[in-house]
Image (cartoon, helix red, strand yellow):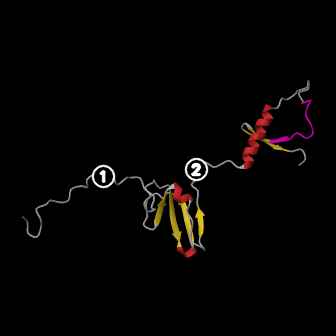
């Protein structure tokens, strides 16, 4: 036995455990779901900022799962700022869907061509093509 020490050697490496996961988990008590967002409080501005999962865990940030990030509320008088990550697919707007529906209707409509190549059935109320981008067209109504 060495003086002032024990007979044990240096600590051996930790025993592998299936309790600790390399995946970051939600910071909420009793929630074990994987984290998808990081919450940070900006006390000076009375703001809670919820953004994409941070690259690494920081002491004053809280990782939240999808459910807890959606239900997040801030104290009275505080503002919640939700930052979107650029990797998430953007949802189409109503204008995008309407433009797509109009393009499908236009493609399905039969075009009558006369001997000179002009459309015989063209009415004055038909939209006018002003630009083309790939297979999509920008149409302007003849009224404008």
x, y percent for residue 16: 28, 51
- Indicate which disc residue 38 carries: none
Residue drawn where x is 58% and y is 50% of the image: 88
Which residue in the structure is indicated by mark 2? 88
Dominant SS of magenta comes to: loop
SS at mark 1 in the image? loop
Q: Quadrant of residue 9?
A: bottom left
> Label 1 vs label 2: CA separation?
34 Å
Most extreme residue toward the left is 1
Q: Quadrant of residue 136?
A: top right
Residue 120 within the magenta-colored segment of the rendering? yes
Residue 109 within the magenta-colored segment of the rendering? no
* Pick the front one: 131 or 68: 68
Most extreme residue toward the top is 115
* Pick the front one: 117 or 106: 106
Image-based side of 1 in relation to 99, left or right: left
Q: Nearer the viewer, mark 1 or mark 2?
A: 1
Q: Is residue 139 above or below residue 12?
A: above
Which residue in the structure is indicated by mark 1? 17
Quadrant, the N terminus:
bottom left
Residue drawn where x is 47% and y is 63% of the image: 62
Image-based side of 73 in relation to 127, left or right: left
Q: Quadrant of residue 128?
A: top right
For disc 2, the neighbor class at 10 Å (few under 14, some 14 to 19, many from 20) is few
Comes first in the chain, label 1 or label 2: 1
x, y percent for residue 82: 59, 61
Residue drawn where x is 46% and y is 57% of the image: 55
x, y percent for residue 11: 20, 59
* Span highlighted in magenta in the image: 119-130
């Amino acid at each position: 036995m060495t003086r002032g020490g024990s007979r044990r050697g240096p600590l051996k490496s930790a025993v592998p455990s299936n309790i600790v996961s390399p995946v970051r988990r939600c910071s909420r008590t009793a929630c074990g779901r994987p984290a998808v967002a990081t919450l940070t409080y900006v006390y000076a501005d009375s703001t809670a900022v919820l953004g994409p999962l941070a690259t690494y865990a920081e002491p004053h940030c809280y990782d939240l799962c999808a459910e807890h990030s959606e239900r997040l509320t801030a104290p009275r008088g505080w503002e919640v700022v939700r930052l979107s990550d650029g990797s998430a697919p953007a949802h189409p707007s109503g204008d995008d869907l309407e433009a797509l529906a109009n393009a499908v209707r236009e493609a399905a409509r039969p075009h009558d061509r006369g001997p000179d190549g002009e459309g015989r059935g063209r009415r004055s109320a038909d939209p006018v093509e002003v630009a083309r981008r790939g297979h999509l067209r920008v149409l302007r109504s003849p009224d404008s």
